[in-house]
Image (cartoon, rainbow, N blue to C red):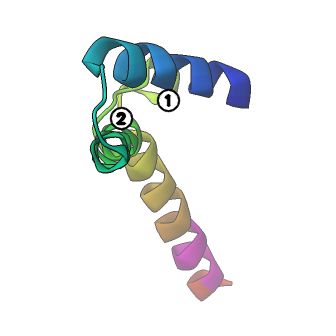
């Protein structure tokens, strides 16, 4: 799984947006991509919602069921 994520990152960020002149530019582009990947990317397999939204829902439900028990 990690290898496919790294490959996707390299394809979408490193190769398409290069050539890179400074390390800071790569770091900033990486932060932007990670933010998109976690908060705005819609995944079909989880109902077309971003991963961070699904995770938030999960933990909210866990908290509600812990309060009921």
Mark 1 Cα-neighbour bin, 10 Å: few <14, some 14–19, many ≥20? few
For the residues labelled 2 and 1, say whether their Cβ atoms are less than 8 Å apart: yes
Residue drawn at 28 percent across, 34 percent down: 21
Q: Residue furthest front?
A: 21
Q: Is residue 63 magenta?
A: yes
- Residue 11's quadrant in the figure? top left
Tell me the magenta residue range: 62-66
Q: Which mark is residue 31?
A: none
Residue drawn at 33 percent across, 30 percent down: 41
Where's residue 20, x and y in %?
Answer: 31, 29
**Secondary element type, mark 1:** helix
Residue 3 or 50: which is nearer the viewer?
Answer: 3
Residue at the disc numbered 2: 49
Relative to 28, say whether 29 is above or below. above
Residue drawn at 53 percent across, 58 percent down: 58
Residue 53 or 14: which is nearer the viewer?
Answer: 14
Residue at the disc numbered 1: 46
Q: Is 29 left, or right, of 51 in this rendering?
A: left
Q: Is 11 left, or right, of 31 in this rendering?
A: right
**Secondary element type, mark 2:** loop
Residue 62 or 43: which is nearer the viewer?
Answer: 43
Quarter of the image that includes the C terminus:
bottom right
Where's residue 4, x and y in %?
Answer: 65, 19
Q: Main secondary structure of the magenta part?
A: helix
Q: Is 31 left, or right, of 8 in this rendering?
A: left
């Amino acid at each position: 799984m990690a290898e496919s994520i790294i490959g996707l990152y390299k394809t979408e960020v490193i190769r398409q947006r290069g050539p890179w002149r400074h390390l800071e530019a790569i770091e900033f582009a990486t932060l932007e991509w990670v933010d998109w990947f976690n908060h705005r990317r819609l995944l079909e397999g989880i109902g077309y919602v971003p991963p961070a939204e699904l995770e938030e829902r999960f933990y909210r439900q866990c908290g509600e069921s812990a309060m009921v028990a």
